[in-house]
Amino acid sequence: MLVTLSSAFAFPGIPAPSEKEKRWDFALVTAEGEVRVALRAEATHGSEYVRSVLAQQNDAGELLVAEAQAEGLEPDPARPPRSGLRFYRAEPVPAHWASKDWPDNYYGGRWGPPYALLQGSFMPDNAHLKSGAADHTAPARPVIQRGMLAWAAGQGGPDFFIALAQHPEWGNGHTVFAEVLPEDMAIVDAIMRRPLRVANWGSINATELVTPLPFKLRRVPGPVGGGDTG
């Protein structure tokens, strides 16, 4: 059973968010700490997909997000890399990032490798959701800045990444559906200090977490999607 939230939807018995909480809509809870995120209204389809994940219920009316997060926050090497909610790719920011002294390409030039992003999956175990649709309006596809969340490969999810630096090399090629609160990027940087390895992904050499890191989702009390990043 899928429940889609509107901006006016409130959860019974849950108090309205405080002014501080209105700055964010949901959090990625990891073993390194909590990363609070504000949805971007400009990305209509991207925000709707996130709301659908946060609002899924099972046949008993229980929120699936809570049910699907029995796994602890420490990584489990036995789990498949992209199983459930987890980060699996961690590309540091190279020292020469964006330097005009390097060739203007991403095959050994100023744009990597590595590629300045933390990538993961936004599809809980046992969820029955279709991938979201990409947003193609100009406001939904800004030039990516540090802290922005975007769907990977120019698609509509469920794979996403958090940018660790500005990405002008991609132009307006990705749907940016959310942003990390600036003070929580320290948690993202801590994840990047976990053990990494380089793996061949065919057309590129990608940098992965040796053991993918799971995360849980926590919603701000009240409506989802009403965050104010100001």
Image (tube, grey):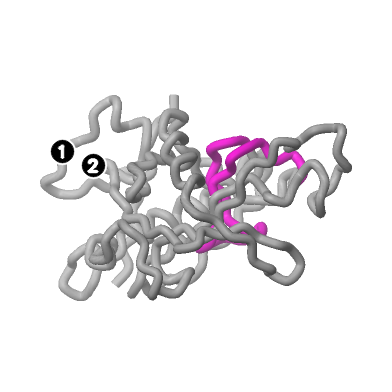
Amino acid type at mark 2? Pro
166 is within the stretch colored magenta: yes
Q: For residue 82: magenta?
A: no
Q: Label 2's element?
A: loop
Q: Residue at x 36, y 55 (%)?
A: 215
Circle 2 crowding by C-alpha within 10 Å: few under 14, some 14–19, many from 20: some
Q: Please say if 178 is above or below 125.
A: above
Q: Which residues are magenta?
A: 145-169
Residue 196 in the image, given as x and y percentages of width and height: 54, 56
Q: How many marks?
A: 2
Q: From the viewer's perspective, tell me whether residue 170 is left or right of residue 25.
A: right
Q: Quadrant of the N terminus?
A: bottom left
Query: Is residue 64 among the parts visible in the rendering?
Result: no
Q: Which residue is mark 2?
A: 221
Q: Residue at x 40, y 62 (%)?
A: 85
Spatial CA distance of label 1 from label 2 is 6 Å
**Element under disc 1:** loop
Disc 1 residue type (three-letter): Pro
> Where's residue 45, x and y in %?
52, 55
